[in-house]
Image: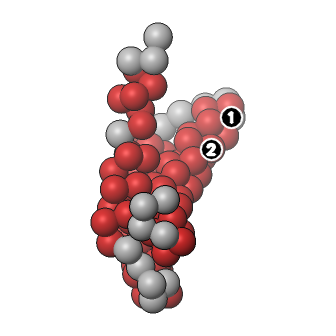
Amino acid sequence: MLGGVHALVSALLGGLCCVVPNGLFALRLFVSARKPGAVNPMTFFIGEFIKIALTIALLGAVVWLYRDLNWLALIAAFIVALKSYIILLFRH
């Protein structure tokens, strides 16, 4: 709110750059765990590599395509989305 509309959009995009790859990774692990005999450590490592590559690609796309980028809002929202798991641990 303090930075205006461009900071809001930058923060939203920064959060999405973290949430979307993590959600797809969790969905991929869930689907592979539901298949009989499909649990394999390579599934995890390949999924993790894809998640990291997708995160970098999304961040690069945001930087490339959004000209009014607010770097502080983007990085802050990305870090908050990454650390939201810790916040959930202390919720109860």
Q: Position of residue 9 (x, y in %)?
A: 53, 69
Q: Which mark is residue 64?
A: none
Which x, y percent locates residue 57? 43, 74
How far apart marks 1 and 2 lie (CA) works out to 13 Å
Q: Nearer the viewer, mark 1 or mark 2?
A: 2
Type of amino acid under label 1: Lys
**Cβ–Cβ below 8 Å for labels 1 and 2?**
no
At label 2, the amino acid type is Leu
Quarter of the rendering containing residue 71: bottom left
Secondary structure under tag 1 reads: loop
Q: Which residue bears the numbered disc 1? A: 35
Q: Residue at x 33, y 51 (%)?
A: 79
Instruction: Pick whichever, 67 or 18, lies toward us.
Output: 67
Label at residue 27: 2
Of the numbered discs 1 and 2, the one sitting upstream in the chain is: 2
Q: Is residue 9 visible?
A: yes
Q: At 38% from the left edge and 63% from the top edge, which residue is drawn?
A: 73
Q: Nearer the viewer, residue 53 or 45?
A: 53
Residue pictured at 43% horizontal, 47% vertical = 81
In which quarter of the view is residue 90 placed?
Answer: top left
Q: Residue at x 42, y 37 (%)?
A: 84
Residue 86 horizontal/vertical position (percent): 36, 29
Give coordinates of residue 12: x percent, y percent.
Answer: 53, 61
Is 76 drawn above or below residue 23 in the view shown? below
